[in-house]
Every structure is written in C-alpha cells, then in structure tokens.
Amino acid sequence: MSASPIRRFQRVALLFFCCLVVQPGYGQPAAVDLDGKPQDPVAGASGRVVVLVFLRTDCPVSNRYAPAIQQIATRYQRESQFFLVFPAKTASAQVIRKFIDAYDYKLPALRDPQHMLVKQAHAEITPEAAVFDKRGTLVYHGRVDNLYEDFGRMRPAPTTHELDDAIQAALKGTRVAVSETSGVGCYISDLQ
C-alpha cells in the first residue's frame, strides 16, 4: 500500500526544509556567544546603535587597538551595544576568553565561524569595525582610526577617528561622512 500523494509531498517538503536548516546561511545564527548560544546582535539591538569590532587573537594590530576599542565602547555604552567578533574558525571559546582577559576587555564576545557577521558587515581585515544604526542598517565599516599608515608603520597618534565619528553620526541619526575605509591589519581568512 503506497502513501498518498499528499503524504509523500509532506515528507519531501519536511526533508527539504531540514536540509536547508543545516546548510550554512540557512537557519544559522549570525554568531554564537562563548557558551555556544546563538546570537544575532544587530537584530537583537532593540533600536540601539550596534558596533561590531572584528578581531583575531593572533593579530598584532588587533592587539594594539585593545585600549582604544575599550575606551570608545565605554564612552558610548549607554547609547549603543558593542560586540567583539572573532571570525577565525579555529578560535575556540577558551582561547578567546584568555585573549579577553589578557587585554582587559569588558565587552561581550561572539564567535563567527560561518562568517555570517563578516558578510553582513563587509569585513575583510582585523581590526575592523562596523556600525549599524538604530534601524539595523550598516552605516560604516572599516578602520578604527588612522593610527596605522601601513602594516608595521604607525603614526605617533591617529589624526582621524572614523569609528568614533560614525558612532556619533549614527546616534544623532545623521549621515555618516565617511561610510567605508580600508583597514590595516590581518586578513580574515577563508572569505568566500
């Protein structure tokens, strides 16, 4: 006795849906926190400005920016939400926790091994920041400032502050003067 066409269709549809859910990009959370819980920081922002800072634990330029990133986050903590995003597929939660402790970060950290946030933010380099306005629209992505002229070449102090400027504009609801800059640092590997 064979199944009715409706039953067969339901089984095929269920199988198809299940296959979509396990494919990267379909049904995947944007990222996971260090306890493995799915997180979507932009969607969960509740009308606040969201700042994603992409870092690698093994990037000397990322490491050099730790104090500046923490200062900017502290300055805007009431009006915005900051997240450290670790896109390296090999960065374990344990390694990231050690990194956060070593650099005295007080910000929530997310793992992005599927590069969902990397794609959403158009990130290519670490350190790189992305600012999403209160509606969840990407308004800036790029460097924190211009401290680094080139890899291994630093200024005594930055002369531009693109991340800070972008956050201020997003908080005011005005257009960001510079919406994209190129960063100096370590490439995010396995970009597709």
Image (cartoon, rainbow, N blue to C red):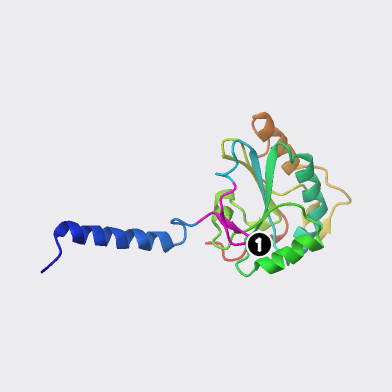
- The residue that appears at 61% across and 65% down in the rendered structure is 189
| Nearer to me, 174 or 19 | 19
Measured as percent of width and height from the top left, residue 71 is found at 81, 46
Q: Quadrant of residue 48?
A: top right
Measured as percent of width and height from the top left, residue 2 is found at 12, 67
The single residue placed furthest to the left in the displayed view is 1
Measured as percent of width and height from the top left, residue 8 is found at 20, 61
| Nearer to me, 120 or 156 | 120
State which quarter of the image contains the N terminus: bottom left
Q: Secondary structure at mark 1?
A: strand
Q: From the viewer's perspective, is 19 left or right of 75?
A: left
As displayed, is residue 134 above or below residue 189? above
| Nearer to me, 109 or 53 | 109
Of the residues shown, which amino acid type is indicated by label 1? Tyr
Q: Would you say residue 137 sits in the magenta stretch?
A: no
Say which residue label 1 marks.
187
Q: Would you say residue 32 sits in the magenta stretch?
A: yes
- The residue that appears at 89% across and 51% down in the rendered structure is 156
- The residue that appears at 25% across and 61% down in the rendered structure is 11
Q: Find the magenta span and give its range.
A: 29-41
